Amino acid sequence: VDLSAQIANMKVNNLFLNASGIHCQTEAELDDLMHEPVSGAMVTKSMTPQSRFGNPLPRYYRLANGSINSMGLPNEGFDYYMDYLKNHEQIKPVIVSVAGRSKEEDLEMLHTLQDDDRYQGLTELNLSCPNVIGEPQMAYDFPSANDLLKEVFSFYKKPLGIKLPPYFDLVHFDQIAEVLNQYPLSHVNTINSIGNGLWIDVNSETVVLKPKGGFGGVGGAMVLPTALANVRGLRQRLNPSIKIIGTGGVTNGRDAFAHILCGAEMVSIGTQLYEEGLGTFERVTRELTDIMEAKGYQSLADFRGKLKVIE
Ligand SMILES: O=C(O)c1[nH]c(=O)[nH]c(=O)c1I
């Protein structure tokens, strides 16, 4: 499987990586991902300038065919992750995910990354966290997102991607693509969880998450149709230079194959990785390879973005 993801010139030998938030908050978790033999890259938990405990527990709940979470941006803080990068050999590319609680925090972290000559990595600006109490998802506010990106790209010159929430209206695909196409983005990562779902334990007649009255982001198998639509919709609208990391609903090789048909350059695995463990990478890679061999494809480029419609 030839794999030359042109995402910030990452030369990787495997298209899979963890979804941000999954197994990537602590040094031990990051080391596990760094030494996991199959995945081609990894991404950190979204970080804020200071460490955060996040929302009160329970804040994650497994569903029959997915998950719901209201973690609330728990992370060890910006300096912790910068130290991690300085003190650990990068066996694979590490995408640094930043999620300030305000425009000022985003700019603060990006200025620091821009000014650090030792930092040459790929950064992902998370504009779609649905669970910080009282905070909107910036990527649903097109003018604000545009203002932020205009300011970011006035000084940030290193590779930068954006983590997007799911959109549910083709006009919104048009509108966000119109904003993003103005900027020299490395990639977009789509989708983040479907924000503010609600799960109820009917026996106790109670929600299952403590924060926000039980409202949380939905992920896992049940979001695959939304994830595929967002990868496809944005691939059809974004400049070809802006690559897509497909995230959402990937549980097996067929799901990954579908993401690539829609145009994904690389594919993230979240809920399934959390529930099954790091062995997911080997299993899904094997399943995808089997599908490719059965179809006679030698490389991802043979079918990437080549989804057929019904004429
Ligand atoms: O609650 C979280 O920490 C969280 N949870 C998500 O589902 N997506 C995000 O971007 C984040 I920052």
Image: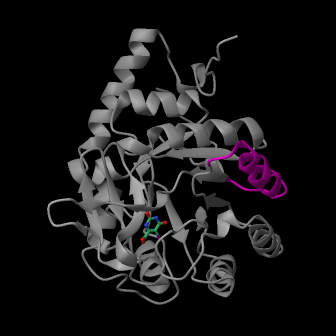
For ligand 1, give the image quadrant.
Answer: bottom left
Q: Nearer the viewer, residue 66 or 190?
A: 66
Which residue extends farthest left? 203
Q: How many marks?
A: 0
Q: Nearer the viewer, residue 66 or 295?
A: 66
Q: Tell me where the magenta segment starts and ends, as one range.
A: 168-186
**Residue drawn 57% across the image and 52% down it:** 166
- The magenta stretch spans residue 181: yes
Q: Is residue 27 left or right of residue 144?
A: left
Image quarter of the C terminus:
top right
- The magenta stretch spans residue 301: no
**Residue drawn 62% across the image and 85% down it:** 105
Is 21 drawn above or below residue 55 in the view shown? above
Is 261 drawn above or below residue 218 in the view shown? above
Residue 152 in view (yes/no): yes
Q: Is residue 18 left or right of residue 236?
A: left
* Percent x, y of residue 204: 16, 66
Is 105 drawn above or below residue 5 in the view shown? below
**Residue drawn 44% across the image and 81% down it:** 83
* Percent x, y of residue 101: 57, 83
* Percent x, y of residue 287: 32, 26
Q: Is residue 117 left or right of residue 220?
A: right
What is the image's colouring? one colour
Residue 89 in view (yes/no): no
Classify residue 75 by image quadrant: bottom left
**Residue drawn 79% across the image and 43% down it:** 239
* Percent x, y of residue 157: 76, 68
